[in-house]
Image (cartoon, rainbow, N blue to C red):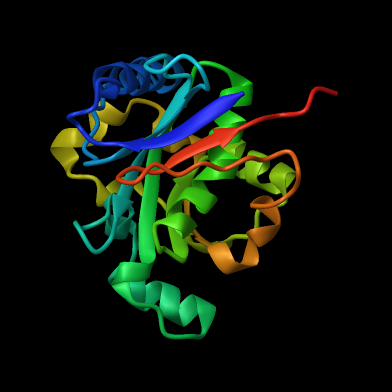
Amino acid sequence: MYRIRVISPESECWSAARDLVIRAYGKKYEAAIDITYRRLIICEPLHESGCVLSCAGFQLASDHPLFSERYLPQCAESVISEKMQRPVSRDQIFEVGSLASSTMGAGRELVRSTPFAGWCMGQRYMLVTITSRLRAMLDDLGMVYELLTSADIAAIPEARRRDWGRYYETQPVCVVIPLDRNVHLFGGDEHQYAFAPEQLNLAITRRSA
């Protein structure tokens, strides 16, 4: 059983989640990056608060410029509107980035649950930069997404490029996930959702095989 939560820097879990990202990117890409997001979405055991199994940055476009926008030729809402062939406002967009996980199962659950978390917060489009490995996971989950552009290291200030280690060798791409085309991921009798008054809190039970 897992719990999915969106947390702020004041949370007791913030340091543990931040450390998980730093360690994961250091080990996987020889990168030396830190969290720049104002929120994190975390996956933890249902009855063991504070034990962060996986996490990712979680940013509302209405609150702050998005990291992935540096790869785009225009602001996110303009690019997504053109791709989707319908008007998209900035307050419908959120970004997820810096995904890190200590277990494959928790990472997969976080990836599957994050669109629903955004939906419950009134968002309709998820902007994310993905590696080939993460793209394969989205495909395996049956997640619908649209390719926007490649993520070029040239968009990173030259003084900071070394911090990213081998990350850009994975040929990452920037995609948008339209949540209304992924509602098939939200339902099913294997999920139970609970909501705290001030903070998103999803309790997820997984049936054993």
Query: Residue drawn at (40%, 78%), measured in percent from left and top?
Result: 88
In the rendered view, would you say 94 is above or below 196? Answer: below
Residue 166 seen anywhere in this rendered image of the structure: yes
Query: Residue drawn at (43%, 79%), measured in percent from left and top?
Result: 81
In the rendered view, would you say 59 is above or below 86? Answer: above
Residue projecting furthest to the front: 197
Query: Residue drawn at (85%, 23%), measured in percent from left and top?
Result: 209
Residue 73 seen anywhere in this rendered image of the structure: no
In the rendered view, would you say 76 is above or below 169? Answer: below
Residue 72 lies, in percent from the top left, at 34, 64
Give whichever of 131, 86 is nearer the camera.
86
**Left or right of residue 163: residue 207:** right
Res. 56 image quadrant? top left
Give whichever of 168, 134 is nearer the camera.
134
In the rendered view, would you say 109 is above or below 116? Answer: above
Res. 204 image quadrant? top right
Give whichever of 23, 9 is nearer the camera.
9
Residue projecting furthest to the left: 159
Res. 162 image quadrant? top left
Residue projecting furthest to the right: 209
Residue 154 lies, in percent from the top left, at 28, 49
Residue 52 lies, in percent from the top left, at 42, 19
